[in-house]
Image (cartoon, rainbow, N blue to C red):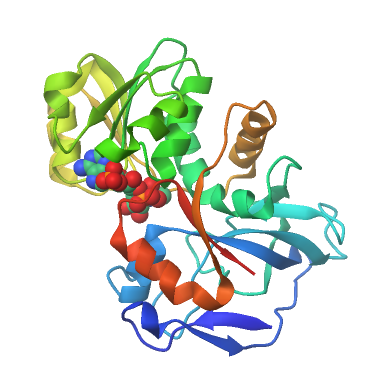
């Protein structure tokens, strides 16, 4: 099979396609023929060596996959031919930039017919991050005022829709060019962060879901109602910030997303109810992974990028 690997840390050009043996599934695993691979900004940082999550190269990046079960005779969960998707192994390496992966069956769920492999591969990391932040950690409910920072991005665009499905009033920050996009996803109020200071435009927020970090998290303290909850996917380790939130009587939580199949099934249910869609901004063939990473490096994404196999 072909895999995309890298021998050194560096720019997108370090990503190289090589031949490798197909991985053999253990008794609780399935071998998946990968059809599409969702890309995440984290992978660009790992490629460049900004973050040592999976050690030193050589390694194979990637977690988000959608594909077809090829083999897995000892697990009761799936049969060969089943269409599945998920973000297996995260945060350990899943080596998913590959034509085949061998992963725990419990980390996958059935792909709904209403999602293409491309769309399904784009959903797990961002969908589970938003689900775990809004449902599991914050417990967002009917009528809550929720502020989603970065509403046009991968996590943000799914978070807007989940918060709406939970009955929240959703406010989001996004670059001006994304206004129509985020309104189309159900955002009730949109703040163009490039021209408007969000702390002047919104208040009495119950839950902030942050995907930006830096001073966006710091200043979010000003818009929360007393006892409000800041949930961040970016600044989860910042002890000084946590202390400031706690001193102000607010709650502060970080998200370390994990491959929970219960959350994945929750996402599938919303998809099947027509309340959640995933926006794929651009797809790239497997061979053009370096171009896809150049696009990741450029930032300002609207929805997701996907590699097709
Ligand atoms: N902790 C975890 O488990 C976990 C899980 C998943 C992701 N993450 C992290 O969460 C972050 C977001 O991930 P993602 O996949 O959603 O990234 P993404 O697709 O790149 O989205 C980020 C979005 O934020 C917008 N943006 C940039 N600066 C902004 C600002 N100051 N205010 C509001 N919006 C701004 C960007 O476009 P515009 O500027 O054009 O609006 C873009 O649409 C990444 O750092 C990722 O590594 C963490």
Question: Where's residue 252, x and y in %?
Answer: 27, 33
Residue found 37% across the figure and 64% down from its top? 295
Residue found 13% across the figure and 41% down from its top? 215
Number of numbered discs: 0
- Seen in the picture, residue 187 relative to 262 is either above or below; the reply is above
Residue found 67% across the figure and 25% down from its top? 273
Residue 225 lies in quadrant = top left
Residue 112 lies in quadrant = top right
User: Which sits in the foreground, 6 or 254?
Assistant: 6
Is residue 258 visible in the rendered structure shown here?
no
In the image, is 39 to the left or to the right of 199?
right
In the rendered image, the quadrant that contains the N terminus is bottom right
User: Which sits in the foreground, 138 or 303?
Assistant: 303
User: Which sits in the foreground, 96 or 121?
Assistant: 121
Question: Where's residue 159, x and y in %?
Answer: 44, 34
Is residue 125 visible in the rendered structure shown here?
yes
Residue found 59% across the figure and 38% down from its top? 263
Question: Where's residue 184, x and y in %?
Answer: 46, 28
- Seen in the picture, residue 18 relative to 136 is either above or below; the reply is below
């Amino acid at each position: 099979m072909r895999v995309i690997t890298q021998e050194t840390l560096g720019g997108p050009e370090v990503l190289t396609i090589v031949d490798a043996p197909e991985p053999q599934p253990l008794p609780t695993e399935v071998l998946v023929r990968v059809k599409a691979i969702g890309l995440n900004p984290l992978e660009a940082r790992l490629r460049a060596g900004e973050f040592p999550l999976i050690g030193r190269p050589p390694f194979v990046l990637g977690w988000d996959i959608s594909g077809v079960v090829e083999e897995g005779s000892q697990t009761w969960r799936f049969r060969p031919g089943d269409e599945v998707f998920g973000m297996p192994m995260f945060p350990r390496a899943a080596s998913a930039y590959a034509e085949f992966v061998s992963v725990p069956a419990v980390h996958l769920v059935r792909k709904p017919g209403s999602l293409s492999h491309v769309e399904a591969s784009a959903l797990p990391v961002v969908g589970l991050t938003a689900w775990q932040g809004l449902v599991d950690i914050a417990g967002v409910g009917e009528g809550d005022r929720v502020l989603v920072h970065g509403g046009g991005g991968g996590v943000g665009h799914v978070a807007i829709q989940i918060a709406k499905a939970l009955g929240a009033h959703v406010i989001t920050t996004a670059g001006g060019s994304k206004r129509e996009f985020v309104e189309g996803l159900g955002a009730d109020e949109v703040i163009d962060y490039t021209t408007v200071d969000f702390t002047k435009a919104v208040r009495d927020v119950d839950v902030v879901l942050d995907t930006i970090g830096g001073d966006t998290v710091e200043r979010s303290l000003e818009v929360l109602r007393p006892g409000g909850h800041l949930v961040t996917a970016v600044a989860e380790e910042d002890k000084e910030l946590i202390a400031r939130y706690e001193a102000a009587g607010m709650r502060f939580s970080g998200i370390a997303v994990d491959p929970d199949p219960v959350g994945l099934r929750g996402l599938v249910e919303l998809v099947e109810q027509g309340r959640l869609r995933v926006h794929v901004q651009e797809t790239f063939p497997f061979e053009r992974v370096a171009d896809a990473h150049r696009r990741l490096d450029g930032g300002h994404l609207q929805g997701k990028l996907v590699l097709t196999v």
